[in-house]
Image (cartoon, grey):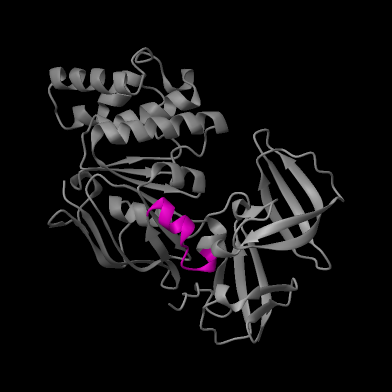
Amino acid sequence: MQKIEIKNLSKTYNKNIVAVNNISFEIDDKDFFVLLGPSGCGKSTTLRLIGGLENCTQGNIILGDKDITNLDPKDRDLAFVFQNYALYPHMNVRKNLSFALKLKKTSPKIIESKISEVSKLLKINEVLERKPSELSGGQRQRVALGRALVRNPKAFLLDEPLSNLDARLRAIMRTELIKIHKNLKRTFIYVTHDQVEAMTMANKICIMNKGVILQIGSPKDVYENPNCLFVANFLANPLNNIIKTEIKIDNNNILFKKINLLINSENFNFNITNNEIYFSIRPEHIYLDKRPDTIKIDSKIEVLENLGHETIVCTKIKDTNEIIYFRDSKNNRFKPGEDISIYFDLKKMLYFDINTELRLIEVK
């Protein structure tokens, strides 16, 4: 299969509610492409437009060298997997898997071969005679995926397929989906609001908000190099530390007035048009010991969140109301109310324009 191209795609409801606003992107063959964003950002609408379940207001959808914008869903050769499984409750697993193939008048021999192949791949071969009500949540999700797999489509469209599962099953199914994608060598377009799903499964992430695309890139790239404040804040677990502050430039020093942080101007090579900025630093870039290119911050511990393998420490910067989160992988025996010195990694601090919220680019 060749790539999927989305060109200037828009969807408007009732003439004034814009769900998707003039977006364009490309999905390469065999991509695991994730549409990521909060509820109402337009990601599921975009997926439904690609699949033909919604008619677009404007724009084009190109599959390979064929414009499929106005084709019926059945003629697009794409397979949907939904959040709510979409299984026939009165049919057993075998009949659910075979239903679409029978509609296409596929020979019984081929149907049985495909069911056997897919059921073994998804580890549901022992429940083929059961009905959906007799299956666990994970098994039902595998059957829903199996219904798509037996069709052998050009691409799979998955709309938050794991959101109904508990945390343990979600982790298991993430691993299963990664393996299935690798084995099938097909394009997956996957919608989720869960950054963990996006970061662990995708080779390319498209982050959306309010119907527009904010950034597209590899998981590593969008995490380490967010192009705007929203992306920096959304791709963060635990919370990213973002502070709005006035700055004062004095000779060779830059003062962040909100937290009384003074750094050498060598660490701040940016053109700014305002005396206010946002700066951010992730919890993993805050240390308990002094290292090269770090600066000391005095704080007081507010809350400890013990996760077993690590503790998330919530501190308040001294003489301010600013809260800072950092990771303690050694599970030190801190106590709420304890004074503590932490160290910001100056090389990992990111800066954003106060008006546009776009990332400030370092002047070389």
Residue 243 locus on image (x, y percent) = 67, 68
Residue 117 locus on image (x, y percent) = 24, 20
Q: Nearer the viewer, residue 269 or 50?
A: 269
Task: Tell me if I can see residue 87 in this picture.
Answer: no
**Which stretch did the figure color magenta?**
218-230
Q: Nearer the viewer, residue 157 or 255?
A: 255
8 above or below 316?
Answer: below
Left or right placement of residue 16 versus residue 301 in this view: left
Residue 166 found in image quarter: top right
Residue at 43 percent across and 26 percent down: it is 140
Left or right placement of residue 58 versus residue 34 in this view: left
Chief SS of the magenta region: helix
Picture mark count = 0
Residue 44 magenta? no
Residue at 27 percent across and 23 percent down: it is 118
Residue at 61 percent across and 72 percent down: it is 278
Residue closest to the far front = 292
Residue closest to the far right = 337
Left or right placement of residue 41 versus residue 355 in this view: left
Residue 220 magenta? yes
Residue at 57 percent across and 53 percent down: it is 236
Task: Tell me if I can see residue 82 in this picture.
Answer: yes
29 above or below 209?
Answer: above
Left or right placement of residue 30 versus residue 82 in this view: left
Residue 110 found in image quarter: top left
